[in-house]
């Protein structure tokens, strides 16, 4: 599978300097963590679940979560697990071009799905583990390891941090240390750590407005900072951490100003695209996705197909950043020093910027690098036209 494969070949050729590379379920764990992109959550109770998964994959979704937790009611859990098992069995016969995960409620559900799918299953890439904690997480991780032992492919865990223990300041330090130590014992099985911002905000009766980002909500922003500090380190002890869910997709009356500048869209004759993005509250999503990356997160949880193009367009590495990253990782740059960017608008410091450069090139591997003169607006326009 490959990002942007649903675009015509000539369109991709015009948009990209370095084309996105293919990946599959057996790719390196770090590659898959960056390749998640916009991870689309789909309720397990959908009557057309298999068709929906295939349709979304054909439209560019490269990671999806079949949701057995928050997206379904308590009284429909048993039927949802049974129907999910059946759907996964159907998809297993002809897997779509997407990584498929299941968000479960309990470790027992992982074992139930393992038995239902049988040895050699090819469809489930892993499980999203809700309400993950230092004391409760090991049972989840053991169940994931048991399924992998019966699978022909790696099976990963994506724990979700969304409990009072990680949010309340007096318990947070010990809880994050405990989670870090637990995840380290299962490191090969941990694909990424997810942050359950909706549940965390709910503990304080907070729901962020669509005109704001999660970084405007103090208690959530404070937690994200601490999670990155404990679990997102780049010294070999950290993990990929994904951006929290964006939950809006329809127009509303605005109080604050729109979050997309007019000029870049006008220069590319894309004023209608700007209006469309704002009418669907996607300007807020785009701002938050940019802030996610600035704060050390990668990818984004989303709940609507319209969220995927903006997140993926913003994941493409701009030509200028790509050239800077290549410059910084050149063998002679290991000795340190400073040199002017190829674009002659900044200085690249070889040692301080090296980790940034390596992560940027990892992102470019799966999302590509834009051609010179191509902006995220051009890529998003192509994606909207292909929708």
Image (cartoon, rainbow, N blue to C red):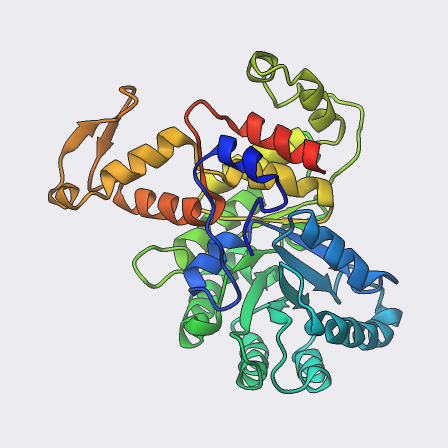
Viewer can see residue 217: no
Q: Nearer the viewer, residue 23 or 289?
A: 23
Residue 294: percent from left, percent from top: 45, 38
Residue located 36% across and 36% down the image? 322
How many labels, in total?
0
Q: Position of residue 76 (x, y in %)?
A: 87, 70
In the rendered image, the vertical position of residue 314 relative to residue 112, given as above or below: above
Q: Is residue 161 left or right of residue 252?
A: left
Q: Residue at x 76, y 73 (%)?
A: 90
Q: Position of residue 16 (x, y in %)?
A: 47, 35
Residue reaching furthest to the left: 335
Q: Position of residue 258 (x, y in %)?
A: 66, 21
Task: Kindly indicate the quadrant of the structure image that contains residue 80.
Answer: bottom right
**Eyeballing the image, is 243 above or below 77?**
above
Residue lying at 57% horizontally and 60% vertically, measured from the top left = 161
Quadrant of image for the N terminus: bottom right
Q: Quadrant of the C terminus?
A: top right
Q: Please say whether residue 71 is visible from this viewpoint.
A: yes
Q: Is residue 129 left or right of residue 19?
A: right
Tell me which residue sits at (33%, 43%) in the image: 356
């Amino acid at each position: 599978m490959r990002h942007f494969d649903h675009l015509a070949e000539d369109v991709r050729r015009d948009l990209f300097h370095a084309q996105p590379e293919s990946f599959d379920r057996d790719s390196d764990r770090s590659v898959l963590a960056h390749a998640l992109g916009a991870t689309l959550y789909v309720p397990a109770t959908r009557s057309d679940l298999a068709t929906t998964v295939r349709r979304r994959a054909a439209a560019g979704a490269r990671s999806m979560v079949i949701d057995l937790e928050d997206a379904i009611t308590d009284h429909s859990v048993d039927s949802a697990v049974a129907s999910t098992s059946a759907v996964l069995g159907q998809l297993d016969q002809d897997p779509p071009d997407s990584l498929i995960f299941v968000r479960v409620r309990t470790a027992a559900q992982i074992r139930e799905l393992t038995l239902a799918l049988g040895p050699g299953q090819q469809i489930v890439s892993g499980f999203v583990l809700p309400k993950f904690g230092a004391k409760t997480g090991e049972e989840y991780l053991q169940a994931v390891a048991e399924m992998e032992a019966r699978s022909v492919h790696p099976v990963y865990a994506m724990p979700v941090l969304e409990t009072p223990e990680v949010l309340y300041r007096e318990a947070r330090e010990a809880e994050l240390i405990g989670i870090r130590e637990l995840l380290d014992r299962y490191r090969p099985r941990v694909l990424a750590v997810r942050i359950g911002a909706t549940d965390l905000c709910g503990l304080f009766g907070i729901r962020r407005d669509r005109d704001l980002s999660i970084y405007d909500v103090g208690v959530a922003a404070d937690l994200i900072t601490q999670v990155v500090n404990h679990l997102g380190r780049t010294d070999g002890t950290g993990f990929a951490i994904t951006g929290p869910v964006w939950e809006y997709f329809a127009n509303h009356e605005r109080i604050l100003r729109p979050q997309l500048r007019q000029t870049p869209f006008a220069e590319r004759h894309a004023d209608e695209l700007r209006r469309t993005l704002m009418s669907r509250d996607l300007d807020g999503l785009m701002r938050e996705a940019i802030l996610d990356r600035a704060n050390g997160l990668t990818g984004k949880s989303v709940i609507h197909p319209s969220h995927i193009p903006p997140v993926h367009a913003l994941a493409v590495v701009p030509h200028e950043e790509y050239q800077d990253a290549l410059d910084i990782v050149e063998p002679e740059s290991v000795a340190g020093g400073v040199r002017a960017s190829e674009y002659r608008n900044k200085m690249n410091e070889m040692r301080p910027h090296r980790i940034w450069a390596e992560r940027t090139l990892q992102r470019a591997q799966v999302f590509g690098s834009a051609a010179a003169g191509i902006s995220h607006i051009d890529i998003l326009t192509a994606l909207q036209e292909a929708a």
